[in-house]
Amino acid sequence: MRYAQGGGLTAERRQFRERIRYQAGERFARSERTAVIARALRVSERSVERWRRAWQEGGMDALASTGPAKLPKVSYGQFAVLEEELALGPAEHGWEDQRWTLARVRALIAWKFGIDCSSAAVWRLLHRYGWSWQCPARRALERDEHAVELWKKDVWPHVE
């Protein structure tokens, strides 16, 4: 299951889903039909079928939550350090232009923490903490660099 912020289920939500699976398990014991269970619990029939197979193989214990799907390789504390490094900019880390690419962030993670992860994992990590990709096609001809610098100096610190 994918979620908008890429984070997966919270502990409370996992417990809620587990209770639904246990309710389904009680209905399996009463030999209720899949469609009836799905409608009553407001889940898909496919999920009920999957739970029924697990219940037949392992009983009610098979319906228990197995915890988070996968712990992230980069912890919250490490990401805070990574954000500080990203704020310094790519030039500070030896790249010529001011663009952070997934490959560069991946290299920074490997250098800073000794963690090797894929570009997709880097994307999920950044997305989990609210970062988005921004790649301007071009700069506006009307852009006033002096006004931009003033805005960065005066307005941005208050916004941030």
Image (cartoon, rainbow, N blue to C red):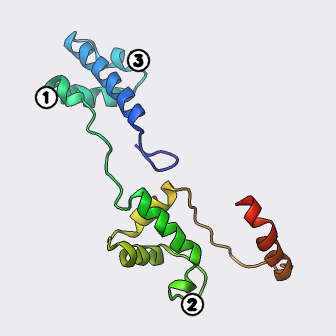
The residue positioned 57% from the left and 90% from the top of the image is 96
Above or below: residue 65 compared with residue 43: below
Residue designated by label 2? 96
Numbered marks: total = 3
SS class, disc 2: loop
The residue positioned 86% from the left and 77% from the top of the image is 147
- Pointer 1 local density, CA inside 10 Å: few below 14, some 14–19, many at least 20: few
Of marks 2 and 1, the one in the foreground: 2
Whether residue 44 appears in this view of the structure is no
Q: CA distance from mark 2 to mark 1?
A: 57 Å
Compare marks 2 and 1 and give the one earlier in the sequence.
1
Q: Position of residue 2 (x, y in %)?
A: 44, 46
SS class, disc 1: helix
Residue designated by label 1? 58
Of marks 3 and 1, the one in the foreground: 1
| Residue projecting furthest to the top | 30
Q: Position of residue 63 (x, y in %)?
A: 24, 28
Residue designated by label 3? 39
Residue type at the position of mark 2: Glu
* Left or right of 150 in this view: 18: left
* Left or right of 67 in this view: 112: right
* Left or right of 32 in this view: 98: right
Compare marks 2 and 3 and give the one earlier in the sequence.
3
Whether residue 67 appears in this view of the structure is yes
Q: CA distance from mark 2 to mark 3?
A: 58 Å
State the residue in front, 140 or 16: 16
- Pointer 2 local density, CA inside 10 Å: few below 14, some 14–19, many at least 20: few
For residue 121, which quarter of the picture? bottom left
